C-alpha cells in the first residue's frame, strides 16, 4: 500500500521535519558563533544578501515617498513665504560664508606659522537615507552609498547641524550606520566653552546623549555646546555634537552626569554627509598652556571648511570666552558671532586680525548684496558707502 | 480566490510579511510592531499544505538577520525552532477554535521573544526585555486577522 506521504497531506509529519530543523539550527548556531568571532567571509555574504534585499527597501519606502509626493503639492502662498524665508537665510549664510573665507585664509596662515600639517578641506559625500531603524533599540540608518563609493568602516556622518553617527557596516552599494543616540555609540567630545575633554554616549531612548563620567568639580553648565574633539581620529574635530540640558550631581559620588540633546536633527531629513576625516592632527598639546588655544583654533579650522557644503552650521566659537551658542537664528544675531570670531582671532594672535581685512576686499559685489551685518572694523575698507543696518 | 495555488499564496504571504516587518514606522509604533513573519510562518506551519516551512523560516531568518544587523543566525534559530514546535503541535492545535489557538500561541511567541533577548545579550547588544514583549501583545491582537485573511485567500471555509 502506498500510504506514505502523498496519501495524507493533512498531516505531513514526515520523518524529515525534525532532522531538517535540527540541521538548520546547528548550521545557524555555527554561523552565529563564527559571526561573533568576526569571520571576514560572512561580511561579504551579508553584503550580497543585503544587495539582494534592496527591493525590500524600495517597497518599504514607497508609502513614505507617496506621502512626500503628496506633500509637495503645497499651496502657492506657503511656497512664497518659504521662498522669502530662504532668501533671507541665504543672505545671512552668505554673509557668514564671506566671514569664513577670511577666517579660513587667516587660519591657514596661522597654521603655516605653526607649521602644522592638518588638512583644511575635508572630502565629503552626500548620501541618502534609504531605511531607518526598524527596531526601537537600535538607532541605525541605511545609506545609499557603499564600498563602491569609498565608504569605510567607522566613517563619520554629519548633517547640517552636527554629528549624526558613524558607519558600522559597509556593503557594496549601501552602508549601515548607527546614530549618536544608539546606546552602544560613544563619541569623544569636548565642551566648547571650557575645552574639557570627555565622551558622550547614546542615551538609548532616541533623544538624548549622556556624559557619564564628568569629574565632580568640572565646569559644566546647562546650555554648553559639545563639539567633537577628534581624539581617536574617527570623527573630524569641531563639529557640534549636542547641547547640555541637564546636569545631575549625586551626593557622595565622584562623578556627575550630564545629559545633552544631539545637535544633529536625527529624525528629520533624508540626506546625510559622509565625512572623510583626516588622521588626527599631531599639533595638539605641545605644552599644556597653549593646549586650549590650539584646540580652539583647530575647532575653528575644522568648522570653517565643514560649513562650506552645509552653510547653516553654527559659526566656530572660541575657547577663551563663553559666547552664548547662536544656534541657527539668522538676522539679528549675525553681528555677534562675527564679532566673537574676530575677537577669537585677536585672542589667538593679535597681529593676525589685520590680514583679514584685505581678504574681504576682492568680493565687493557680494558684500553689497548683503545687509550690512559685518562688524564696523572690517566693513570700513571694503564697502564704505553702505547704508546703516535696518 | 487563489494566487496560483497554495505555493504561490505561500510565497506571496511571506513577501507581504517581510514588507510589513520592515516597513519604516515612527519609533513609538515601531516598538509595537507585530511579529508578522512569525505569525505568517506559524500559520503555514499549523494549517499549511505540505510546503517547506522550515526552508522558508531559514530564508526569512537570514533576511531578518541582515536587515536588523543582528549576528547571522540569530533569527534563523528562533524562527526554525518556533516553526518546528508548531509543526509538531499541528495535530493537536488544529482541533481548537481560533481564540483558543490564539491564547495557546502566546507562550510560543513569548518564547521567541525571550530567545531573541538572550541572543542579544550574548552578542553584548543592549536591549530591553519589556520592549521585546510589546510585539507579542500586538501579535496576539493581529493573529485572528492574519489567520482569517489567509484562510479566506486560500478559499477555506471560515469557521470561528
Image (spheres, coloured by chain):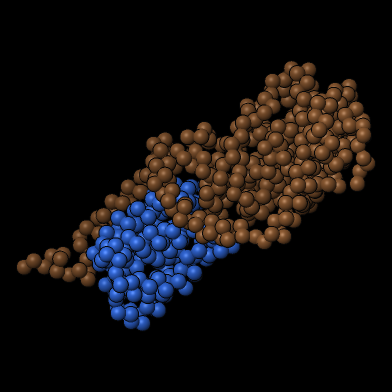
Chain colours: A brown, B blue
Residue A379: horizontal and vertical position, in percent? 89, 32
Residue B81: horizontal and vertical position, in percent? 35, 59
Residue A383: horizontal and vertical position, in percent? 89, 32
Q: In the rendered image, which quarter is residue B106 located in? A: bottom left
Q: How many marks?
A: 0
Does any portion of residue A284 appear in the rendered image? Answer: yes
Outermost residue on the left side: it is A1
Residue beneath the point at 71% across and 37% down: A307
Left or right position of A378 against A57: right
Q: Nearer the viewer, residue A254 or A356?
A: A356
Does any portion of residue B31 appear in the rendered image? Answer: no
Residue beneath the point at 77% across and 41% down: A93
As drawn, B40 above or below A355: below
Q: Quadrant of the N terminus of chain A?
A: bottom left
Q: Nearer the viewer, residue A107 or B107?
A: A107
Q: Nearer the viewer, residue A287 or A145?
A: A145
As drawn, A66 above or below A106: below
Residue beneath the point at 78% across and 21% down: A109
Q: In the rendered image, which quarter is residue A206 located in? A: bottom right
Outermost residue on the bottom side: it is B160
Residue beneath the point at 63% across and 53% down: A267
Left or right position of A34 against A215: left
Q: In the rendered image, which quarter is residue B80 located in? A: bottom left
Residue A196: horizontal and vertical position, in percent? 77, 37
Amino acid at each position: 500500500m502506498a500510504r506514505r506521504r502523498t496519501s495524507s497531506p493533512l498531516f505531513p509529519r514526515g520523518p524529515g521535519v525534525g532532522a531538517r530543523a535540527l540541521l538548520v539550527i546547528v548550521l545557524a548556531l555555527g554561523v552565529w558563533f563564527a559571526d561573533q568571532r568576526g569571520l571576514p567571509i560572512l561580511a561579504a555574504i551579508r553584503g550580497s544578501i543585503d544587495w539582494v534585499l534592496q527591493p525590500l527597501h524600495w517597497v518599504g519606502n514607497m508609502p513614505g515617498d507617496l506621502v512626500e509626493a503628496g506633500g509637495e503639492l503645497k499651496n502657492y502662498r506657503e511656497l512664497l513665504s518659504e521662498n522669502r524665508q530662504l532668501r533671507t537665510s541665504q543672505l545671512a549664510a552668505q554673509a557668514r560664508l564671506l566671514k569664513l573665507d577670511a577666517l579660513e585664509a587667516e587660519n591657514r596662515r596661522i597654521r603655516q606659522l605653526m607649521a602644522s600639517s592638518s588638512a583644511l578641506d575635508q572630502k565629503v559625500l552626500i548620501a541618502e537615507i534609504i531605511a531607518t531603524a526598524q527596531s526601537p533599540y537600535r538607532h541605525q540608518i541605511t545609506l545609499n552609498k557603499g564600498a563602491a563609493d569609498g565608504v569605510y568602516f567607522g566613517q563619520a556622518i554629519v548633517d547640517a547641524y552636527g554629528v549624526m553617527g558613524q558607519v558600522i557596516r559597509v556593503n557594496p552599494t549601501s552602508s549601515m550606520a548607527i546614530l549618536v543616540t544608539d546606546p552602544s555609540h560613544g563619541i569623544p567630545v569636548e565642551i566648547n566653552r571650557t575645552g574639557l575633554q570627555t565622551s558622550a554616549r547614546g542615551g538609548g531612548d532616541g533623544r538624548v546623549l549622556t556624559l557619564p563620567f564628568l569629574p565632580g568639580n568640572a565646569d559644566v553648565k546647562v546650555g554648553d555646546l559639545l563639539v567633537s574633539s577628534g581624539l581617536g581620529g574617527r570623527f573630524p574635530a569641531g563639529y557640534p555634537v549636542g547641547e547640555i540640558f541637564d546636569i545631575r550631581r549625586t551626593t557622595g559620588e565622584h562623578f556627575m552626569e550630564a545629559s545633552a540633546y544631539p545637535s544633529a536633527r536625527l529624525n528629520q531629513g533624508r540626506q546625510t554627509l559622509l565625512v572623510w576625516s583626516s588622521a588626527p592632527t599631531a599639533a595638539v598639546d605641545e605644552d599644556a598652556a597653549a593646549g586650549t588655544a590650539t584646540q580652539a583654533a583647530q575647532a575653528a579650522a575644522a568648522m570653517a571648511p565643514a560649513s562650506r557644503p552645509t552653510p547653516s552650521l553654527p559659526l566656530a566659537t572660541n575657547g577663551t570666552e563663553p559666547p552664548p551658542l547662536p544656534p541657527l537664528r539668522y538676522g539679528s544675531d549675525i553681528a555677534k558671532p562675527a564679532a566673537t570670531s574676530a575677537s577669537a582671532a585677536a585672542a589667538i594672535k593679535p597681529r593676525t586680525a589685520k590680514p583679514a581685512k584685505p581678504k574681504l576686499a576682492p568680493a565687493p559685489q557680494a558684500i553689497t548684496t548683503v545687509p550690512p551685518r559685518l562688524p564696523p572694523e572690517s566693513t570700513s575698507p571694503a564697502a564704505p558707502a553702505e547704508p546703516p543696518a535696518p | 480566490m487563489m494566487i496560483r495555488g497554495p505555493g504561490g499564496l505561500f510565497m506571496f504571504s511571506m513577501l507581504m510579511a517581510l514588507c510589513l516587518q520592515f516597513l519604516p514606522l515612527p519609533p513609538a509604533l515601531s516598538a509595537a510592531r507585530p511579529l508578522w513573519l512569525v505569525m505568517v510562518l506559524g500559520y503555514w506551519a499549523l494549517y499549511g499544505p505540505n510546503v517547506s516551512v522550515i526552508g522558508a523560516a531559514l530564508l526569512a531568518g537570514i533576511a531578518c538577520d541582515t536587515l536588523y544587523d543582528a549576528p547571522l543566525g540569530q533569527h534563523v534559530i528562533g524562527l526554525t525552532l518556533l516553526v518546528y514546535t508548531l509543526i509538531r503541535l499541528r495535530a493537536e492545535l488544529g482541533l481548537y477554535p481560533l481564540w483558543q489557538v490564539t491564547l495557546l500561541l502566546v507562550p510560543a511567541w513569548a518564547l521567541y521573544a525571550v530567545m531573541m533577548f538572550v541572543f542579544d545579550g550574548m552578542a553584548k547588544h543592549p536591549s530591553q526585555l519589556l520592549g521585546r514583549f510589546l510585539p507579542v501583545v500586538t501579535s496576539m491582537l493581529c493573529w485572528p486577522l492574519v489567520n482569517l485573511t489567509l484562510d479566506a485567500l486560500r478559499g477555506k471555509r471560515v469557521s470561528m
